[in-house]
Amino acid sequence: MTEETKLGKIEISPTAIAHLASQAVLQCYGVVGMAARTLHNGLAVLLHPRESYRRGVEVRLVDDQIIIDLYVIIEYGTRVSEVAHNIVQSVKYNVEKALGVPVTQVNVHVQGLRVSKE
Amino acid sequence: MAEKPELRCDGQDLKRMLATATAWLEKHAVAINALNVFPVPDGDTGTNMLLTMQAALEEIGNTPQGSLGSVAQAAAYGALMGARGNSGVILSQLLRGIANSLDKKRSFGPFEFARAMTEASTMAYKGIIRPVEGTMLTVSKDAAKAAMAAAQEEEDLLTVLEKTVEAAKESVARTPTLLDVLREAGVVDAGGQGLFIILDGVLHCLKGESIEMKEPTEMVPAELPEEAEMEWGYCTEFILQGKGLNLAEVREKIASFGDSALAVGDERVIKVHVHTFDPGQVLSYASSLGVLSNIKIDNMQEQHREFLVLGEEAAKAAAEEMEGIATVAVAWGDGLTRVFESLGVKSVVPGGQTMNPSTQELLEAVETLPAKEVIILPNNENIFLAAEQAQKLSSKKVVVVPTTTIPQGIGALLAFDKEADLKTNAKNIEKAIAAVQTVEVTTAVRPAKINGIKIKKGQIIALLNGHLAASGEEIEEVVRETLDKLGADQYEIIALYHGEDTSLQAAESLGDEIRRWYPEQEVECIDGGQPYYHYIISVE
């Protein structure tokens, strides 16, 4: 993502956008983790929060449009569709607020559910 | 005499409580919506919570069993399915915790209630990895704590509930001290407020009060931390000199006085910087350790206000600009760009011979200017078309003045009068540019024969107002021939803009030559930095 100004160029790397997005995701209620986007044997790996933004978030720039893919683990017993919807809203809002650039797509991939002991 | 029978509630009581709570929430939903600031400012927390509660009630209505456990389960299930928004999902988790706790129970008293509240809060906290305090979760935790404490003092259910509601209210008021976004907005957390209203509704039901005619209560006022009054404080800086100073200790102490604390140095000299509300306290602490010097205390509140005032003035200036006429010029080369800018051109679009700016570029330049009326100076015949296109496409009032050369563009700007209207300006400018003679000196890229003049490739040629006027081997002779042809002795000023491939020395020696040829005229040398043309000469 680059922007030309009179004095020079502003460049925002996909990694930075991914970091922003992951911060927003982790503040969403119902999200208990992010998952590695590459699924071996159909197993989602719950990532440590610190490495979340590297592996659970994918940012693509297609024709200068930002597309964000999120791979998340959601708490069992919550309304998954609503949590996913909240994630989309929150990520879009937070990334746009920080960058001032519209986010074209936010795709949420629910990779698994976590069952807490009751 | 037997003890007063303990007040216990069954499934039907819970049903009524939730119904009353929902009705109470409905009365406050709009006010709660108005509090919304985080994280998506679409202002619908009240509505979301209400829809979630209504879904819970509906499910209770669809459940034939009326036992406490099944009513609670139905509420949890309904809320789960109907959860809307972040706050709705949290609410559904709270109800799920309550349902788990009340499962298989016939009725609840103070202890069961407190346990259910605790379980609800615990359940809600599980749903997020990084709970942010100062939200609905915090309120649920504080309410549960108060309920448990009251139950352990063997209070009856009504008292326990009263204390729970009171604690929830206090917790809501505290949310701005915990969460920056709330403090900045000066509001309490909307979800927390909603939860308080729900608990308050339950209390009304237990007391047997009807809420139908009741006016909604005021929103809990935000308990703002004191900085809000003067959030900038004093920027305090000084140098502390002493013997055997403990840097770590000083740093810690300074940090306790305020924000943005900084202490750097060694055991003899420490530089201190801190934003504090009480600089005196900092100074007297530091002076007890050693000698102070270079003390500087600034009132940041004042600075902030000045900054705001400056901002207003800048905005006013921008608004005035909006009224006037702005100019867009096409030019190529650092020097020419500077010349145009110094003459008040608001936007110089790069372009010229062999590099024509697109309509889009011109249009963007026109549209981004803070002015309603714009004059475009194309400064090249090849750019007229693009400029006229931009004029048609623009939403602003645009006039294209047909300047064909750089000197004409400059002449146009000298005639431009900021105070006059667009029409008058266009007329004056056209008159002015007609009086400007332009000589362009370049090197022929191919042999040709034009206007009876034969050119060999690599020869120096001069164009007078766009038409070939002279050719030769030396720049000086070509310039002289052209100036003679146009009768430069009839004009006043000869300005020489030398190109990027021409040195300042060469330009000045040519300038001196011209001064000798035309001693009556004023000769100026200016660095134009344009490509292709060794010189652009304006005669007027």
Image (cartoon, rainbow, N blue to C red):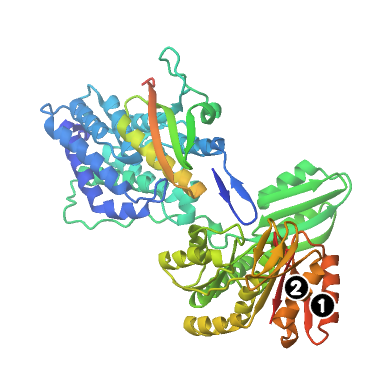
Query: Label 2: how many residues lie within 10 Å, few (<14), some (14-19) or many (20+)?
Result: many
Q: In the current view of this chain or complex, which residue is farthest to the left?
A: B64
- Give the mark nearer the N terminus: 1 vs 2: 2
Q: Position of residue B463 (x, y in %)?
A: 67, 69
Q: What's the mark number on residue B514?
A: 1
Residue type for callout 1? Ile
Q: Quadrant of the C terminus of chain B?
A: bottom right
Task: Look at discs 1 and 2 and give the one toward the viewer.
Answer: 1
Whether labels 1 and 2 share one chain? yes
Query: What is the spatial separation of the Cα atoms under label 1 and label 2, in whole angstroms?
Result: 10 Å
Q: Position of residue B533 (x, y in %)?
A: 71, 63
Q: What's the mark number on residue B496?
A: 2
Q: Position of residue A66 (x, y in %)?
A: 46, 40
Do labels 1 and 2 touch, CB within 8 Å? yes
The answer to whether residue B350 is left or right of residue A64 is: right
The answer to whether residue B43 is left or right of residue A103 is: left
Residue type for callout 2? Leu
Chain containing the residue with disc 2: B
Residue nearest the viewer, comparing B37 with B6: B37
Q: Secondary structure at mark 2?
A: strand
